[in-house]
Amino acid sequence: MNFEFTEEQLMIQESARDFAQNEIAPTTVKRDINAEFPADIVKKLGELGFLGMMVSPEFGGAGLDTISYVLAMIEISKVDASVGVIMSVNNSLVCWGLEEYGSDFLKQKYLIPLAQGQKLGAFALSEPEAGSDATQQRTMAEKNGEFFVLNGIKNWITNGTSADYYLVMAQTDKEKGHKGITTFLVEKGIEGFGHGVKEDKLGIRSSDTCSLTFENCKVPKENIVWEEGRGFNFAMNTLNGGRIGIAAQALGIAEASLDAAIKYSKQRKAFGKEISNFQAIQFKLSDMAVKIDAAKLLTFKAAALKDAGKSFTNEAAMAKLYSSKIAVECALEAIQIHGGYGYVREYLVERYLRDAKITEIYEGTSEIQKVVIARSLLKDN
Ligand code: CAA
């Protein structure tokens, strides 16, 4: 067992940290207040290779491992979790899935610009009546010659209005249940494909989330990812990696909360001394640090297993479950340490709480992660 990062991994971490502090931080608060998508930042992230981190250079990516991706995700999310989720969806749900399962045609036409950051991707699985119970897809894709005709609605789509390419799960054979679901790559702007208004969210307000609508939307059959009927397996396999990205996003928020709590506790005086001198505060800081370290170990373990080509479904679920839980806890404690100042915008920690909450919901709720973990326990024992 080796707990050291390589020089290359540390370099990626440092360059993500520099980028986050110099290019992202100056506009984070304003974009959160105005729910403004960080288009310029996303463009620069792409130019630096942060949008196709794990894609091989052959397809325009940086060819890095999952550990490097986690390190970068933590640094970016520590400053702005909205930018974190935009980056996570493009890397783990869109690029990874296309490289792993896409045809050469799809890789040449779509993966290269996505990995180079010239185009942005979105992942469309959830529907108004298919959230946690994702097999219940109502979006239909009916075969018509060389095309499939899509009809239906998707919900809660990250990068919903800003993406160029969408991976859309739809039912091609209702009789077959989840084995009749297929994934399509749908380009923005094609006839019959629209989107709803941007959701007015509690947190990650600078990322854009909306519904998608398909009305007799014709998608060429060569835009099927993997094979007809493999769309649900595609979504599940891809989400396993996505969950590592969200665990890293949650870790970034938790670290930001601890840093803010330490800084404030060393400045704020009460009863004649800095509050960091009181055990009540010290115990909170210690608890936060232990939780963050435990969550990191889970997340890097899942990433290391993925890099080694081993099964990591269970580990990714554990990493996401625990990291998202402690992100909420750490943000709450940071607010408590700040007292009244923690409850107002000026001190940032209220945003950490708002941003942390979604990590317990998207890419599989905490309850779904527990289902995944329990199934593995019951199967293996
Ligand atoms: N990894 C790989 N395969 C998996 C899997 C996993 N984690 N979970 C299920 N599967 C496979 C099963 O092996 C099975 O495959 P076969 O039929 O080929 O054998 C198939 O999926 C169906 O599985 P189940 O019979 O277990 O189906 P189920 O309905 O009982 O449970 C579920 C499935 C685990 C609850 C699944 O529906 C699930 O994960 N739900 C959560 C959905 C989710 O994460 N949504 C996130 C939306 S995307 C998002 O949030 C992105 C964003 O924009 C930020």
Image: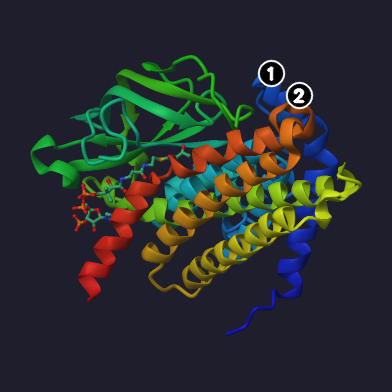
Residue 299 point in image, percent of width and height: 54, 63
Q: Residue furthest right?
A: 272
Q: Residue furthest front?
A: 271
Q: Residue at x 69, y 29 (%)?
A: 343
Which quadrant of the rendered structure holds the C terminus? bottom left
* Residue 99 appears in the rendering: no
Q: Write down the quadrant of residue 168 in the picture.
A: top left
The mark tally for this picture is: 2
Q: Write down the quadrant of residue 125 in the picture.
A: top left
Q: Residue at x 72, y 44 (%)?
A: 337
Q: Write down the quadrant of residue 46 in the picture.
A: top right
Where 350 sits versus 178, above or below?
above
Q: Residue furthest bottom?
A: 1
Which element type, helix, strand or loop, lies under badge 2?
helix
Q: How far is disc 1 from disc 2 in space, using C-alphas? A: 6 Å
Residue matched to label 2: 30
Residue matched to label 1: 34
Which amino acid, by three-letter code, is at mark 1? Asn
Residue closer to the observer: 355 or 8: 355
